[in-house]
Amino acid sequence: MKRATIGFRVHSGWAAVVAISDPEGSPAVLDRQRLVIVEEGAPGAKQPYHFAQRLELDKAEKYIANCARVSECLALTAVGAIIRGLQDREYRIVGAAILLAAGRSLPSLSKILGSHPLIHTAEGEFFRQVFWKACEHLGISVTGFRERDMEQCAKAVFGGAATRMRETIAGLGESLGPPWTNDQKMAAFAASMVLAGNAGPATRRKTSGKSPTKRS
């Protein structure tokens, strides 16, 4: 079977998702979607920590846990459909890439809800983890790339060809048509790094300094 990877750039309640392969060594887009993983119209669903800020702590914990269950179910269904579609086309998914923020550790929920900047950080991590868990549940190895380290990671993977690869992916929009914004470009670029570095079974988790984070 042909190899493919999936890249995610996550926002509050949704993600830009791009699946790629590399026929003849050149990246090709197999699928691209905007996956929404919240119930439209549900109070606070897109910003669960903002909504939880107005609740008592025990109710806030239950609310966020319920939001996680709903979003994880929706993500599992949506990502699973993408993977099945690729498998039907005889592609083997060898990994997934998720764009990360700075990666700072989060304190307790009470401290998060008492800090507006931490609320934003927690919500970003919340939705990234939802997609991460969905991939893991489906047996797909996940690699996390900090956005600020993308160029360094690309050089480690592609060497002197890193700039050319980034420009090639950016230019795919000319033939694909919209949408091909920074969301799709970064998701595809991250997926291309996983594809280049993963020629076989899923790798085990490895974390070292500014290197990507891999998890199977």
Image: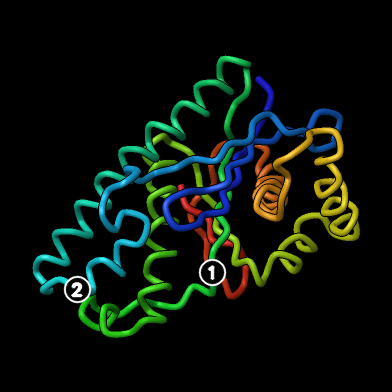
Instruction: Mark 2 or mark 1: name the one nearer the start of the chain.
Output: 2
Quadrant of the rendered image containing residue 126: bottom left
Taking depth in this image into account, of 42 and 20 the one nearest to the observer is: 42
Circle 1 — which element? loop
Q: Is residue 60 above or below residue 164?
A: below
Give x and y (percent) for residue 104: 45, 78
Q: Please name the residue shown 47% across and 49% down the image.
A: 14
Circle 2 — which element? loop
**Which is more foreground, mark 2 or mark 1?**
2
Along the horizontal axis of the image, is 23 left or right of 86? right
Q: Please name the residue shown 56% across and 44% down the image.
A: 96
The residue carrying mark 2 is: 54
Q: Is residue 161 above or below residue 27?
A: below
Give x and y (percent) for residue 2: 69, 24
Taking depth in this image into account, of 82 and 141 the one nearest to the observer is: 82
Q: Please name the residue shown 41% across and 56% down the image.
A: 127
Give x and y (percent) for residue 185: 72, 50
Q: Name the kind of residue labelled 2 in the image.
A: Arg
Q: Name the kind of residue labelled 1 in the image.
A: Ala
The residue carrying mark 1 is: 101
Which of the image's four quarters has the N terminus?
top right
Taking depth in this image into account, of 30 and 53 the one nearest to the observer is: 53
Along the horizontal axis of the image, is 46 left or right of 90? left
